[in-house]
Amino acid sequence: MKILVAHNAYQQRGGEDSVVDDEVALLRARGAEVELFHASNDGIGGMGRLDLLGRTLWSHPAATEMRRLCERFRPDVVHVHNSFPLLSPSIHWAAQEAGVPVVQTLHNFRLVCPQAMLLREGQVCEDCVGRVPWRGAVRGCYRGSVAQSSVLAGMLMLHRAKGTWQRRVNRFIVLNEAYRSRFVAAGFPAERFVVKQNFVDLPEPRDTSRAGVLAVGRLSEEKGWPTIAQASALSGVPIDVVGRGPLEEVLRASAGLTLHGSLPPQEVYTRMRAASVQVAASVCIEGGPRTLIEGMACGLPAICSAMEPMMEIVQDGVTGLAFPPGDAQALAQRLTWAQEHPEAMLTMGRAARRVYEARYTADRNHAQLMSIYQSAIEEGPRRD
């Protein structure tokens, strides 16, 4: 199979970029021929505002390049991950017009929410789901800017009016049922959705004693770091933190947290195989929390906030523990309990590894991808 993967990379590398790299490597390792149509936001600083505005709404250069790649490479399917802002949804039209079906992975809520996370002032906000996103624009939900938020709202309305998502995408991949339900509520065609989680490919860890609490991720508000810091102080349980982000200096002043910055993946996995539990305290509706799946592969149970997507991965009392989102006192109690019951946490970690083997391996992910691609190919390019 020949697959053209399109992705607009972020300035600060995150989990979405890693997913793209891992899927491309997986497909190539299993015999597929993969070409990457790649753009990077690193070049945005040198662009004029009008040029960036135009490309966000409809990128003629990206559409031209998509047509060129389809003519030269002749892919069986185009798989789009992120098109914001430099590629734009123009590439969906260009691919279909070139006779190639399109699969779109929805890693976040960008196509229904200017801010992309359904989050406002630390709380889940669904005001723009299925509606004209004027609230997101006037509130400046994207980076606190009314102007930039208005551009995003305009992009959403333009492609809603053109019917891009109804007319130019064969299959949507989402990472959980919580995402699927929101997009369907926003008017996306329910029959074209497939739930496929992220994956990692890690060997079974040796069954040894474990100690310590680990937290991994971007150091930003939506990940619930203030709750983690407060819970560590309340419980007296120290936490090792891996990651960087805007809250780094604030968290560095928290006595219970030890910040290690960003670490290479293999070093993160080494720490996951040695820790007794990891903490994930997001207050937003996560897409596919890779750190939870990585931890499960390493036999590491999780204490996580009881948000919908996390509860699709972690089973309370079986592969980890749950607490109400934003409740530092409840998290402190779970941390204390975990410290006092090391054998129970070892048992949960073994159960987590079994769930990983059943759901999140490279083999299973590859089979799912091939099935999704094949169904899009059989349907053929959309001409409606």
Image: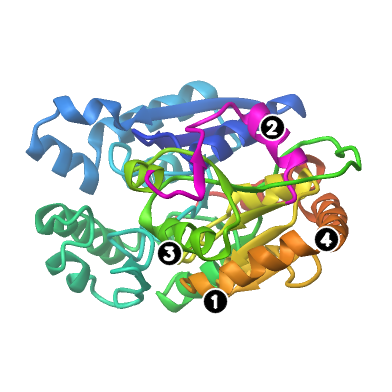
- Asked whether 6 or 328 is in front, the reply is 328
Helix, strand or loop for disc 4: helix
Separation (CA) of disc 3 from disc 2: 27 Å
* Residue most extreme to the top: 72
Q: Position of residue 159 (x, y in %)?
A: 29, 59
Question: Is residue 325 left or right of 196 when viewed as pictured?
Answer: left
Q: Is residue 28 above or below residue 53?
A: above
Which residue range is magenta in the image? Answer: 253-276
Marks 2 and 4, Cα distance to the nearest angstrom? 32 Å
Q: Earlier in the sequence, mark 2 or mark 1?
A: 2
What residue did someone put label 4 on? Answer: 348
**Do callouts 3 and 2 mark residues in contact (Cβ within 8 Å)?**
no
Q: Which residue is mark 1?
A: 324
Of the numbered discs 4 and 1, the one sitting upstream in the chain is 1
Q: Earlier in the sequence, mark 2 or mark 4?
A: 2
Label placed on residue 166 = 3
